[in-house]
Structure formats: C-alpha cells, structure tokens
Amino acid sequence: MDNELFLQITDTSIKIGLGALIAAVTAWVVLRRSNPPQTTNSAGDNRRIQILEDVSSQVGTVTHIFAKYSSLVVESIQFGERWPQARRIELESVNTELVAEFKKMAEAEAKLLMLGEKNLERSLRLYGAKIAVYRKQVYVGRKDISLEQITALKNAITQVREQFYDMLSRKYDRLLASV
C-alpha cells in the first residue's frame, strides 16, 4: 500500500505542477500580446520631442535678439544724427549676436530636416529670410523709410513666426500624445 500511496501523491504533484506551468505560460503570452514592447518607439519619440524643444528654444533666442536689434535700429532712424554713440556700439554688439544666432538657427533647420520635417524646416527658413529682408531694408542712417513701413515688415515677420510655431506645436502635441 505504501507504493500505491506514493504513486498517487507523485501523480497528483505532477498534475499540479503541469497545471501551474501551463497557467504561467498562458499568462505570460496574454500579457505579452496585450502590452507590446514600446521602449524603442517611446525612446525615439522622446528624442524627437527633445529636438523639437531645442529648435523652439533656438528660435526663441533669435526672436529675442531680433527684437533688441529692431528696437535699436528703429531708434537710430528716429534720432538720426543725434543718436548716441553708446547706442551705436550696443547695436553693433546685438547685430553680432544676431548673426551668431543665425548659425544656430541653420543648425535647427538641419535638425528638422534630419527628422524629416521638411515643412517645419521651410517655415523656419522663411522666418529667417524675413528677418534678413528686414535687416536689408531697415538700417542705421536710412531716412526714406517710415515707421508704418517698418511696422509692416515686423508684422510680416511675426506672422511667419506664428505660422512656424503653429506647425511646431501641432507636431509636438502629436508626439506627446503617442508617448
């Protein structure tokens, strides 16, 4: 009888073990199918988000420096020959700073192209081109331009900047929703 009891206990133990193994494998398969691995997509999306944030920051810096440049050059036009030398030196410094930031803006355009964001890159390039046109038309010593013309140029720049940020914001929101 001891052998028969031993066989029954062994048989029951094997059945319980196999049942537990089947349940564990089934649970593992179900969990794996319901939660596909998203680490690579999420990491890639996070990197894209970071790049878009960097681009936005670079454009914000250019916008700030351009605002300083614009106010100084308009001041120079208004004051004409009476414009103080210290302000001329300040304008030269801001102009140098703006040129340096344009290099960073070109790098931001390259990042957008690297991400395949051609429309965003074109919009950013148009923003930079509008600033360049402004700098060619509004400069120290120019007497034949009115404040209305200067304001119209600045409004065109503002409009292009807003279009760029609208596009960037939509892309950014889509990426955030997918993470």
Image (cartoon, rainbow, N blue to C red):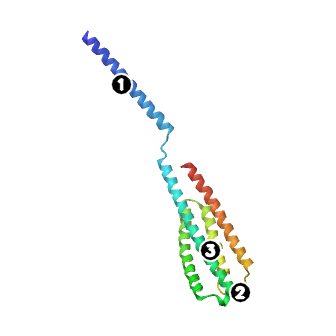
Q: Label 3: which residue?
A: 67
Q: Secondary structure at mark 2?
A: loop
In front of the other: 8 or 98: 98
Q: Position of residue 160 (x, y in %)?
A: 67, 67
Residue under the point 28% across and 11% down: 4
The Cα atoms of the two marked residues, 2 and 1, are separated by: 94 Å
Residue under the point 66% across and 82% down: 75
Amino acid type of disc 1?
Gly
- Labels 2 & 3 near each other (Cβ < 8 A): no
Q: Position of residue 120 (x, y in %)?
A: 61, 62
- Labels 2 & 1 near each other (Cβ < 8 A): no
Please state which of the two labelled residues, at mark 3 or mark 1, is closer to the viewer. 3
Amino acid type of disc 2?
Lys
**Relative vertical location of residue 34 with respect to residue 102 in this rendering, above or below:** above
Q: Quadrant of residue 28?
A: top left
Q: Label 2: which residue?
A: 143
In front of the other: 24 or 147: 147
Q: Residues within 10 Å of mark 2 (few under 14, many from 20)?
A: few
Q: Position of residue 150 (x, y in %)?
A: 71, 77
Q: Which mark is residue 178?
A: none
**Relative vertical location of residue 144 with respect to residue 176 in this rendering, above or below:** below
